[in-house]
Image: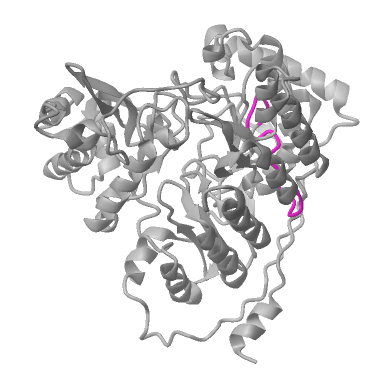
Amino acid sequence: MSLSTITKQSRETRKPKVNWARIEEAGHFADTVKQFRQGKLEPDLFRRFRLQNGAYGTRMADDYAMVRIKLPAGEVYPHQLERLATLSEQYSIGSAHVSTRQNMQLHWVILEDVSEIMRSLAEVGLTSREACGNAVRNVMCSPLAGVCAAEEFDVTPYAIATAKFFLRNPLNQSLPRKFKFNFTCCEKHGMARMVDVGLIPQIKTINGQARRGFKIFLGGGLGNKSFVGHQLEDWTPEEDLLYTSIATIRIFDRLGDRKHMERNRMRYLVDSMGWEQFQSLVLKERALVRIAQSVIVKLSVDQTPQKLESHIRISGFDGKSIPDGFSRWRKGNTFAQKQPGYHSVSITLEAGDITASQLRTMAEVSREFSAEGYARTGFVQDIYLRYVSESDLPRLYSKLLEVGLANPGSLTMVHPIGCSGTTSCNLALTNSHRLAKEIQRKFIELKLDEDDDLRESSIKISGCPNSCGQHEIATLGFFGGGGRVGKDMYPVYQISLGGRSDGETMLGANLMRIPAKRVIPATLKLIEIFKANKKPGEDFKSWIHKVVTGHADSQVKTLDDIKKILLPFTEAPSIEQDKDFYADYGSDSSYHTRTGKGECAA
């Protein structure tokens, strides 16, 4: 028996701690679809039901759905990845999509097949329940929680407990709009200020005793109008986490605007009411919740220490046969954990897409290389493999290389975010999904992932102003629209600069509109401008920040200076001069704006 076989047999498949599924929901969905098809259920009622069960509408196609699978805290196990691979082949397009909110999505599913997917997901403990609709959505948690050197404690158990408490809870089945939680390990690795409830772990010493708690931010969010969240109080003890969450949801449920869809996220309520009044209401409501429910309502946080599999190194590399490209990949895709000898690996996907065969490889490498035995989805359409022994990195890279999952630069500007855009979304105006792929391919070709000046920067792209691609918190953000020369239309993007979601969270400043086919050359020009104006030790992200905030010490000092330099990129040729200019990425026909009824507009 080979050493490889011994190792695989010695590693039992890690079982999930939580079964998120209820098998009976699949049958109920199937019955409801039949009623809808027979005309016994009003379309709006069916739409709400469909969304509550995780089935989104698909662009201009009423007979198809996108099924969104919730992965609380991003945790996904090998057998679940294998099941997702099979479902993508049987019912979807042979691939899945990893979202920025740690979900997995299956696109272009026939409506009658959604219940079969739900039933199959339930067999492996997964659910699509409340992945869409006006409820608490997938509870996010930094993929580096538990391994980040800057964190004060691991928030993963709290994220899982919060997800368990609110899933199917009557408290949040009919909220004014969707509601989002984000737990993050530290100030850098998350978006705590850009969601309804964002949490950062914080230990406070009281009477000589270290106590766990959180910095809690409320009322943030991205959309057609975005807001940065406010910190509720200096420190919230862990025993108040659930009461604070319940209180916030109850205030939103009572006072949220149910009449105007475009203004019914919680951030609009906070803005219209004023932070101080909203803060006062939440603190008063929390006191009532604590008194009324403290005896019977608890947050069940599993603090059992994680058991790591014993790791047997499999022979195969002698130190001289390391594959080409390994050092480049290691620099831009791995993160040294606080646990000595272990690394987290960010596996780059193109705009979040992953094929069925790649999903199966992910299952295999999760078993074989991760000492914790499973993977995590991240915040930028990637997948993390954690607790990988440093000595196993070359062999892991080789394995990923075989299936096209070894693209470099996952943790750099080379890896853009792109929402689904016109590939499936009713509201999209441009193919942001394809543009993200084009940028990634071009930047990898130019080896920009090896440029340390660009490492901390980000590019994020949305197909419309609604921020599904998080463009407002990117170093370079883009959202789609349309331009016109006479009767001929062409795709354009509004570019914004200087957004960020770290401790200095701020929204990007709008600069100008750039035609879609000029986005890549304009971006390269912007990098060229930075290189000519940077000071020693200054990277692209910090230089852009200085320009946006009026503190640049260079020839290019203001946004107007940049606009003047980029102005030539905005000039549109006639359609006779350049027919390709008038077609969006991924299309060979002339561009036009066509939208339907949105189900995710903020």
Residue 63 point in image, percent of width and height: 59, 32
Q: Is 226 placed above or below 544 here?
A: above
Q: Dividing the picture into quarters, in which one does residue 79 lie?
A: bottom right
Q: Is residue 275 visible?
A: no
126 in the magenta segment: yes
Residue 537 point in image, percent of width and height: 23, 49
Q: Residue at x 46, y 76 (%)?
A: 395
The quarter of the rendered structure image containing the N terminus is bottom right
Q: Main secondary structure of the magenta part?
A: loop
Residue 255 point in image, percent of width and height: 67, 10
Which residue is nearer to you in this view: 534 or 9?
9
Q: Residue at x 56, y 22 (%)?
A: 219
161 in the magenta segment: no
Which residue is nearer to you in this view: 381 or 62?
62
Q: Is residue 601 visible?
A: yes
Residue 404 point in image, percent of width and height: 41, 63
Q: Which residues are magenta?
A: 122-136
Q: Residue at x 46, y 45 (%)?
A: 380
Which residue is nearer to you in this view: 223 or 252?
223
- Which residue appears farthest toward the front when viewing the image? 38
